Image (cartoon, rainbow, N blue to C red):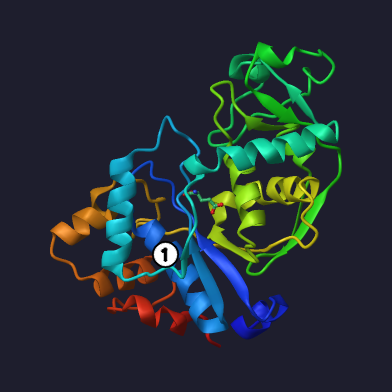
Amino acid sequence: MTWRALTAALPSHWTTRFAPAPTGRLHLGHVLNAIYVWGIAQAHGGHVVLRIEDHDRTRCRPEYEAALLSDLAWLGFEPDTIAPPQRDRSGRYEQALAALHKNGLVYPCDCSRRTIAGDAPEVPNEELRYDGRCRSRNLHETATLARRVRIDDGVEAFNDLLLGPQVAAPSLQCGDFLVRDRLGQWTYQFAVTVDDLDQKIDLIIRGEDLLSSTSRQQHLARLLGRVEPPRFLHHPLLRHPDGTKLSKSRRDSGIAELRAAGRRAAEVIGLAALRGGLLGDATAIAANDVAQFFVL
Ligand code: GLU
């Protein structure tokens, strides 16, 4: 399948986004994602929105945000539009929650992680499946800030532009969605879905580690009134030469460390492309040349 065939389903003017969370410094994994986002946009007429995903106020830091913007500019990836950060969008998330509430889909939930986990084994990095026990408890609105959205047992299907047909049932994955936690923070799934809707994102390009979120976001988007769902492309994650997954703590993959070691931006982009399997040899590639991976 060619890239031209893969992107044929997109409208003639389309929008994608680069959406880092300022919870740490940028690393080569972000650069690989930027190569896909800007490369596909450059090759197939897309518009890139930069969105700072700082919905989790306990983990995000202004210094990470500043560093992230500086690293991105140093690399040479320039967005066409900068979206408002999520910290400024609380009023809009409230409004989206109110619309779901009006449809009878929202209820307060004061279950702790421990209550939900019960005796079930924890799966690392996976949300626990919630069994819906607060659905019928009629907790008072003031009992907790946490809110869940009721979902049905339906199956969500989508055709990933790289991975092909995907099917998942959010009710089996995670159960009723947590949209606001007990600290009053908007959850990733909710904030991202409202943002992708409002910012008219047509194509979501991200790593395969977020594949399991897609059916949830597609379901939520429909509940929020999105008629045409976005298209999705999940790309392989970057690996170290020894095959292990990249982590923020690894010094050899942080952009700050690579910059400090005297690497040029084009070398760093070439390194991410090499480790991501887009290149066979180490070659320097400028940010405005990344379309070459996605033209055929
Ligand atoms: N903010 C997320 C991250 O940094 C990406 C979210 C998304 O692409 O949906 O991992």
| Horizontal and vertical percent position of residue 292 | 45, 84
Q: Residue at x 67, y 55 (%)?
A: 197
Residue 138, picture quadrant: top right
Left or right of 16: which side holds 29? left
Left or right of 117: which side holds 291? left
Q: Residue at x 53, y 73 (%)?
A: 47
Instruction: Count the labels in the image.
Output: 1
In the rendered image, is residue 29 in sight?
yes
Residue carrying label 1? 32
Give whichever of 252, 5 is nearer the camera: 5
| Horizontal and vertical percent position of residue 67 | 28, 51
Q: Is residue 283 above or below residue 67?
A: below
Give whichever of 199, 281 is nearer the camera: 199
Residue 201, picture quadrant: bottom right
Q: Is residue 261 above or below residue 39?
A: above
Residue 152, picture quadrant: top right
- Amino acid type of the residue that numbered disc 1 sits on in the rendered structure: Leu
In the rendered image, is residue 119 in sight?
no
